[in-house]
Image (cartoon, rainbow, N blue to C red):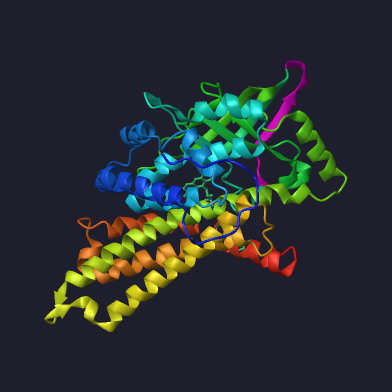
């Protein structure tokens, strides 16, 4: 694994990838070619968590905190996007099984104290001999796009210095099979989303139960489940960021002060380029496959790419993919270099990449004709996998809402 030197200095934006970034891209691409792509169809059909592949990723150093920390250290901010695009190019269901843990880790990394990071992050991954996964559980049956409607409650039991959680979480990636669950809950419902906090539920905690794996359109290898929390008792130290930080935040909200830097919104904006990069990986896979097919499939005595209708479709696909990547890289660079997201640039990147993935994979199916509709070719799977990118981590409509609010300065709803 190529290593990046740390440091917080401002880093100029450049489209020229450094040697380390090119090495990272080629290394992850090699893993995607040799390990992930060949296994994609099988694990999609099995609809099971691909533990042997997670283990393989751990063995080569692609799954674990060292890998993520190295990506975070890249001063350009691009490394995680580059790695994600390559891994999801291989297969999205397997890649999500490998990368899904990153959501919980990002929450611990973003809001936790140094002690919490040291204690919980290694437990999210386990080790190569016995890999584990982690889950980030925020969505609820009545609180999807409307995060402020969250009903899961966290009550503090002062006498025992314990938090008691009750509620239900929906559609959590790795929910129920995770070693570590990060769960959001309302501490003060009168404050809406500003009265919420995130908690780590350590391995083996009583009262947390996942449903069986939900059956999905795409990303079928990746485990998705609802999670029930029934009097889940957690040590006080499981509140991410600690009690003083929470009380200070609640006080600010109660006295009507603005949230400092709109912290929660910034966290979402920071994670969105990586999600966009995942969508890009699927789109690029479908584009490359259909380009090859169009060059070799002969109808009316010539390869179908010699029809402008096909060639122009491919030109549009490539243009859209490249445009989406520029938005993804810009937002990733802005996040890493503490730039203000003045126009919802994080949301723009995820919105564009998600919609491009849906359009490009649909077009790829069309270019393959009947073959595109059959499971013998991977494009039907990529078409199914792509759709989630206009839905999770904020739907396309919610991304537009964030952008519209940012550019108008209005609290549009
Ligand atoms: C495979 C998968 C994995 C997931 N993984 C996780 C996970 O790990 N952790 C987690 O917490 N969640 C996860 N989710 C949940 C996901 O983030 C939510 O499904 C998503 O945020 C949308 O919420 P919802 O499904 O309740 O849709 P709703 O909020 O009910 O939205 C329904 C429709 O209404 C639209 N809509 C809602 N409000 C507005 C508005 N104000 N203006 C315009 N349109 C609006 C939406 O855009 C959408 O089209 C996952 C979901 C899936 C399917």
Q: Residue at x 42, y 72 (%)?
A: 319
Q: Position of residue 290 (x, y in %)?
A: 27, 66
Q: Is residue 31 visible?
A: yes
Magenta span of residues: 149-160
In this rendering, does residue 219 appear at all?
no
Q: Is residue 299 above or below residue 110?
A: below
Q: Quadrant of residue 398?
A: bottom right
Q: Which quadrant would the N terminus be assigned to in this image?
A: top left
Decide if residue 365 is on the left or right side of residue 168. left
Horizontal and vertical percent position of residue 408: 72, 69
Image quadrant for the C terminus? bottom right
Q: Nearer the viewer, residue 339 or 251?
A: 339
Q: Nearer the viewer, residue 162 or 179?
A: 179
Which residue ends up furthest to the left in the rendered image? 301
* Outermost residue to the right: 255
Q: Position of residue 16 (x, y in %)?
A: 48, 60
Near-viewer residue (359 or 391)? 359
Q: Examine the image and state in which quarter residue 292 appears.
A: bottom left
* Residue pictured at 61% horizontal, 62% vertical: 345
Q: Residue furthest top?
A: 160
Counting from the top left corner in percent of width and height, residue 328 is at: 52, 59
Is 199 left, or right, of 61 in this rendering?
right
Camera-nearest residue between 259 and 36? 36
The number of callouts visible is 0
The answer to whether 397 is drawn above or below residue 182 in the figure is below
- Left or right, 127 with respect to 367, comes to right
Q: Residue furthest front?
A: 19
Q: Residue at x 39, y 48 (%)?
A: 23
Q: Is residue 348 magenta?
A: no
Q: What residue do we see at 65% from left, 44% from top?
A: 150
């Amino acid at each position: 694994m190529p290593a990046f030197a740390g440091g917080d200095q401002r880093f100029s934006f450049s489209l020229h990838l450094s040697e380390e970034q090119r090495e990272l891209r080629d290394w992850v691409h090699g893993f995607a070619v040799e390990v992930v792509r060949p296994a994609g169809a099988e694990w999609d059909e099995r609809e099971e968590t691909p533990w042997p592949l997670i283990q393989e990723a751990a063995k080569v150093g692609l799954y674990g905190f060292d890998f993520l920390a190295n990506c975070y250290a890249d001063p350009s901010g691009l490394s995680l996007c580059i790695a994600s695009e390559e891994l999801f190019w291989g297969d999205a269901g397997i890649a999500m099984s490998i990368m899904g843990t990153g959501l919980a880790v990002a929450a611990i990394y973003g809001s936790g104290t140094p002690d919490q990071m040291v204690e919980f992050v290694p437990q999210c991954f386990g080790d190569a001999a016995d890999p584990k996964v982690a889950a980030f559980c925020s969505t609820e049956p009545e609180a999807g796009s409307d995060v402020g409607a969250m009903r899961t409650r966290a009550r503090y039991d002062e006498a025992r210095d314990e938090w008691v959680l009750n509620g239900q979480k929906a559609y959590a990636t790795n929910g129920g099979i995770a070693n570590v669950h990060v769960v959001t809950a309302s501490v003060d419902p009168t404050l809406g989303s500003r009265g919420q906090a995130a908690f780590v539920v350590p391995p083996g905690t009583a009262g947390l139960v996942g449903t069986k794996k939900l059956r999905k359109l795409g990303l079928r290898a990746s485990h998705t489940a609802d999670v029930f929390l029934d009097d889940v008792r957690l040590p006080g130290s499981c509140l991410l960021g600690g009690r003083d930080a929470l009380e200070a935040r609640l006080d600010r909200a109660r006295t009507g002060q603005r949230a400092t830097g709109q912290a929660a919104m910034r966290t979402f904006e920071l994670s969105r380029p990586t999600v966009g990069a995942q969508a890009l990986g699927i789109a690029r896979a479908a584009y490359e496959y259909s380009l090859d097919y169009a060059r070799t499939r002969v109808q009316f005595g010539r390869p179908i790419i010699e029809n402008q209708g096909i060639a122009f479709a491919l030109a549009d696909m490539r243009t859209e993919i490249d445009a989406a990547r520029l938005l993804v890289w810009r937002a990733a660079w802005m996040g890493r270099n503490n730039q203000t997201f003045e126009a919802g640039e994080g949301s723009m990147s995820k919105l564009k990449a998600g919609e491009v993935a849906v359009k490009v994979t649909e077009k790829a199916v069309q270019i393959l004709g009947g073959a595109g509709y059959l499971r013998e070719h991977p494009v039907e799977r990529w078409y199914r996998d792509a759709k989630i990118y206009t839905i999770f981590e904020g739907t396309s409509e919610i991304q537009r809402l964030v952008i519209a609010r940012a550019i108008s300065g209005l609290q549009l709803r």
